[in-house]
Amino acid sequence: MLRCLPAALALCATQMISATPAFADVLEPANVDARAKVLVHLDVEALAKTRLFRLLREDPDLGIEGALADFSDETGLDLIADVRAVTVYLNDVEGHWVALLRTSESVDAALDVLAERPGYEKSVVEGKTVHALREGGTDWYGYLYRSEVGSERLFVITEDVGALLGAVRVIDGEAQSLDEAGHTALAATPKTGSVLYVSADRGLSELGDFEATAEVSRLVTGVRFDCGETDGMLFAGLRLDTATEKDAQDIHEVVQGGLALASLISGRTEETAVVGELISALDVDQEKTAVSFAFRYPSQALYDGFVNLKALEGR
């Protein structure tokens, strides 16, 4: 679904309804279905303010400016100026991803352009004005909230009209949300300066292409990841939950062994020396049934290391 978000960003609009949802850039558990099992929150405004993103954006070899221009051409929106935050969650019961995008009034004009596409269609379902986009064999359905004051907009976008209506009922307070369910683990508050927050109440083998017999993926029952930047320092934290303390201990030992081996190898060449510096900035701890990883590194130094690696590879 995430690969198709540019085409879906501008696909929905409707009149203001009675309940006004939260428009904060921070993660809003009140807008997320209580049945969610995987949650991803990207704070675009926080990303744009980081030193690391500014440095990467100015690097012509990465093509970030070109990608941003392509996004604007596709949607009619400036990703950095108009899209402020994105929350994506997986409804485990229906098996559909739902995207909540906090954006601006610029999307109104983008919607007018979208309405001219052959694959665009507007209909009323259960009293809600639903806008659909059908392109490339994929259907997308959307609904738009407008704030009572100001230019804020909140999109709800998904690939199934039933999932869309279910997500709208949560935001309207007609169905249970994460905070009402007391689901504090999944909807934990991201740290100050957080850009990306990921939380999942399931094992690694269910989240990606991991071997079912792989030691770490087999033992993990939940994942929490948070990264961002404060005062020019990049930070990242990862927590792996397990069923027992023995499982956590086993993961801790596997990771420590891998880091020790990587440290030995890192001093052999200039390229691997950069990896060694990053490893030294990583702390790994075990606390009961969880293994935690904490990383802090100056953003400027990280970018400089990246540039040096490119130079070494080009020699």
Image (cartoon, grey):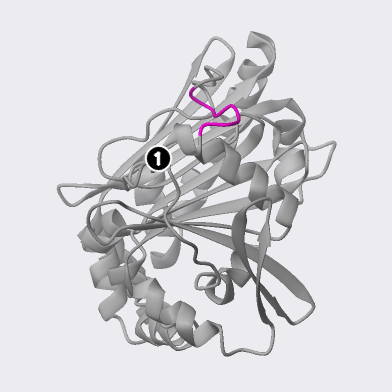
* Residue 182 falls left or right of residue 309: right
Please tell me whether residue 209 is drawn above or below residue 247 in the rendered image.
below
| Mark 1 secondary-structure assignment | loop
Residue 13 image point, x, y percent: 49, 66
Look at the image and tell me whether residue 260 can be seen. no
In magenta, the rendered stretch is: 173-179
Look at the image and tell me whether residue 168 can be seen. yes
* Residue 52 falls left or right of residue 173: left
Residue 79 image point, x, y percent: 37, 72
Please tell me whether residue 231 is drawn above or below residue 300 in the rendered image.
above
Determine which quarter of the picture holds residue 178: top right
- Magenta highlight: main SS: loop
Q: Amino acid at mark 1?
A: Leu
Please tell me whether residue 8 is drawn above or below residue 171 in the rendered image.
below
Please tell me whether residue 62 is drawn above or below residue 95 in the rendered image.
below
Query: Can residue 176 be found in the magenta stretch?
Result: yes
Q: Residue at x 38, y 43 (%)?
A: 20
Q: Residue furthest right?
A: 213
Instruction: Give the class, few, some or many, for how many residues have Cα within 10 Å of label 1's Cα (few <14, many ≥20).
Output: many
Residue 265 image point, x, y percent: 51, 51
